[in-house]
Image (cartoon, rainbow, N blue to C red):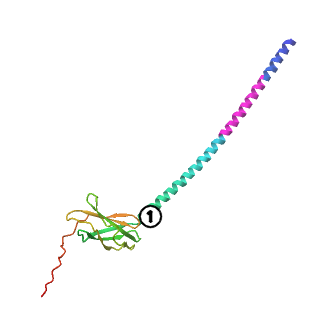
Amino acid sequence: MLNSTAKINKILIGSIIILLLICSILCFLTFNVQNRLNALQSNYNQLAIDYSNTQNKLNNLQSSISDLNEAIITSNSQERIRIARIADVNESRLTVIAESLSGIDVVIVDAIIRDSSGNIFAQNNQEMSPQILPAMRSLVHFDINFPHANLSFGTAYTITLITEEGNNFTSTPFTRSSYTPTPEPQPSIMP
């Protein structure tokens, strides 16, 4: 009986040692897994911070782009003119009647005439002196010469006015006025 008690004690002690080893291994594994989970959590937190910072930078960039777009739209929309009508059209000259609608002076520096197909028919090539349309919304009359033009009767044209800021404003179609021949110089009669 003593022998069998000793065997049982040995088995029991062996089982306890095995259980202790298993517990030690499980504790080690649990500790190792917990450390890895903590490292993953730390990495995740850093990624979340990096994502948040990147998102803030993107939001700031988007805001800057919006501000820039607004500035561009504002600067382009500051110049607005209305071409009320085109008058006194002859073969190479016409009168423009226009006004500034934008509350600022608009300076016209060039003009282009296009035919009904949109092709450039004549260009002033900045030979005209700059014409100022004052901010106070008053109609201004000014003549523009197109030295090499030969505007035809019955043909529809448009004129595009180009501002000092580089903006373009186009009229509604117009045609050449009634033909009035230029009088020929008369020879003087000697008595």
Q: Is residue 170 left or right of residue 155?
A: right
Q: Is residue 184 left or right of residue 164?
A: left
Image quarter for residue 83? bottom left
Image quarter for residue 127? bottom left
Q: Residue at 65% x, 39% y: name it.
A: 40
Q: Residue at 86% x, 12% y: name it.
A: 3
Q: How many marks?
A: 1
Mark 1 element type: helix
At label 1, which amino acid type do we have? Ser
x then y, percent, for residue 118: 28, 58
Q: Is residue 53 above or below residue 132?
A: above
- Outermost residue, front direction? 190
Q: Main secondary structure of the magenta part?
A: helix
Q: Is residue 78 left or right of residue 15?
A: left
Quadrant that contains the N terminus: top right
Q: Residue at 30% x, 69% y: name it.
A: 84
Q: Is residue 168 left or right of residue 51?
A: left
x then y, percent, for residue 138: 35, 74
x then y, percent, for residue 69: 46, 58
Disc 1 target residue: 75
The answer to whether residue 26 is visible is yes
Find out whether residue 84 is within the magenta segment.
no
- Outermost residue, right direction? 2
- Of 116 and 186, which appears nearest the observer? 186
- Outermost residue, left direction? 191
10 Å crowding of disc 1: few (<14), some (14-19), many (20+): few
Q: Is residue 12 above or below residue 69?
A: above
- Of 5 and 96, which appears nearest the observer? 96
Q: Residue at 77% x, 22% y: name it.
A: 18
Q: Which residues are magenta?
A: 18-40
